[in-house]
Image (tube, rainbow, N blue to C red):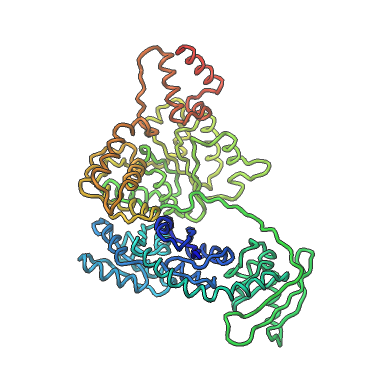
Amino acid sequence: MKMKVLAIAPYVGLRDLLLEMVREEDAIRMDAEVADLQEAVPMARLAEERGYHIVVSRGGTARLIRRHTSLPVVDIPVSGYDILRVLTLVRDSNSNVAIIGFPNICKAVAEVSGLLKFEIPTFTIDHRSELEAALNQAFEAGAKIVLGDVVTVRATQDRGYHGILITSGRESVSDMFREVRRVFDVYRQGREKWTFFRSILDSDARAVFALDRDKNVLFMNKAAGGLVGTSPDENGSGGSLQLQFPALYKLIEQAEAAPGFDGRLLQFLHVKERQYKVSVSAPEGESDFQYFVSLDSIESWRNERRFAAYMPSRLVSFHQLVGSSALLKKTVSRARKYAQTDRNVWISGEYGAGKSLFAQAIHSASKRHDRGFYAIPCGEMTEEELDALLKGTLEDLSLPETGFSGTLYLNQVDRLDREAQAKWLSFIIRNKSIRFLASSSTTWNRLKSRADFNPELISALGELHITVPPLRERMEDLEEIVTVMIAAYNSQSGKQIVGFREAAMDELARYGWSGNLRELKNALDEMLILTKGNYVEPQDAAAVIERYRHSSSPNVPGAAAQIDLSGTMEEIERRIIQHVLQEEGMNQSKACKRLGINRTTLWRKLNKSLKNET
């Protein structure tokens, strides 16, 4: 009999590592999902219904799901090797580093850092509720990067700092598999009895709930799941009765407030024009269960789906603009001052330099930080989408009509055609309660000289102006940027890469990076995929860089177009049209907007060129 294991990994890379290593375990069949803390609870509830024998998770997530499933939960440890790798990654960072964690982690870090002769400030917590205070202490001590588990990293990022996850490596996963085999032998002995009693409850036509003292659902059978609108095969443990079944919650609350209530209740509950007979009883003796509840006359409820849009889901802060160069510090300093005003800001810079990151950071540091941030892709939005946003439709309100008073970020504003420019200018003038940020890859002076761009729109959006420096002008920040990118890659891939060999870093430093941070990330991801050990080797870096040297410039949007200007005007025009079409992914609508012509004219010119070539 194969063990059926559900792995709930708090980050993507651990899931992938588990699925890779389980192939060597003949006796184990594993499914793996990515979730952390409360996100993992519904999966844990489903695990037993779906026939799993053991749940595997890590850290705080493992401790939480133990309270919501009767299945054994095996923890994936953080080993000394894991700590050694992450300390090696950050030991040469220019930014101050701290670690926040439970006593076992902090003790291990202290021992390993002592061996490395690398002192790192450590803030020990005994409970999640102490995390915020520990973060405050770390930041007051000057920390810019915090090491920790997934919850610590998320809280750090929410505060606008960089968090680096202490990932679990192969050694830790191997230890976990040994524990899974031991636990399964014990678990199997009691499984048959549990399955028998569970099947009795699931075959009951009544809806059966078991509640704790706070009226959280510790268990509900299939009929109860159907009543509250959950999946029929979900046991539903761990949810709040107040949220899942407010009418029943209110009924029990009223009974508890009545004089002489002895824990027993027989009542009728009227819900959606139907009646249910409700029986409540309190078990005798010491137990985690406060009430057993059963309801007759079950019907399925339809869950109402509600949608909300947040763009993006997590905003960048100034603390996350990586680098300590004088040029970056000067730009950040100016942007911080602009953030404190309520004036519109125009952000110039090359493709991939990080204009969107600066826009998010300005909003995050402004007094509007809690009123919403929307990024508008000016080069991609259709006329219909723009009108719906600015004016609304019969079905939907316009953005101002929703009461929005946050920040609108017009990305690639230099890609707007004349008609769209006029619409935005009118919108900006009418809506003084909204702050506008704009960015362009076209330089400020060049855009002012363009006959097809409205100078009034430039004035309206460009009350203040900053230029984001290209990567090649702040190469002293390269190593620090690479460190942060490696940490992010490790958490997604499951690898434990700790850095570049010196010669490999030299390869990065010698390249021009015309595509800036975006090009660096793409190249770095490719190098890290090729890397088999803990360090990126020179040959892997050189192979990727060499390919970029031959192909990056023509493919970087916004880079100077190398168009052959020889021949007749008609031939030059044809080359321009083909170049714009290629930049727009052969999308004729977008190309027409760039060229300022309609689709009929574009089709005619392309057709004429085709005839001339044939």
Please state which of residues 328 and 185 is positioned toward the viewer in this rendering. Answer: 185
Q: Is residue 298 left or right of residue 32?
A: right
Residue 350: horizontal and vertical position, in percent? 36, 37
Q: How many numbered marks, from 0 up? A: 0
At 54% from the left and 63% from the top, the residue drawn is 43
Q: In this view, does 116 lie above or below 365?
A: below
Residue 33: horizontal and vertical position, in percent? 49, 58
Q: Residue furthest front?
A: 1
Residue 8: horizontal and vertical position, in percent? 47, 62
At 44% from the left and 14% from the top, the residue drawn is 570
Q: In this view, does 402 lie above or below 86?
A: above
Residue 23: horizontal and vertical position, in percent? 42, 57
Q: In this view, does 112 lie to the left or right of 18?
A: left
Please state which of residues 588 and 189 is positioned toward the viewer in this rendering. Answer: 189
- Quadrant housing residue 17: bottom left
Q: Is residue 203 left or right of residue 217?
A: right
Please state which of residues 69 and 141 is positioned toward the viewer in this rendering. Answer: 69
- Quadrant housing residue 193: bottom right
At 63% from the left and 61% from the top, the residue drawn is 231
At 37% from the left and 64% from the top, the residue drawn is 174
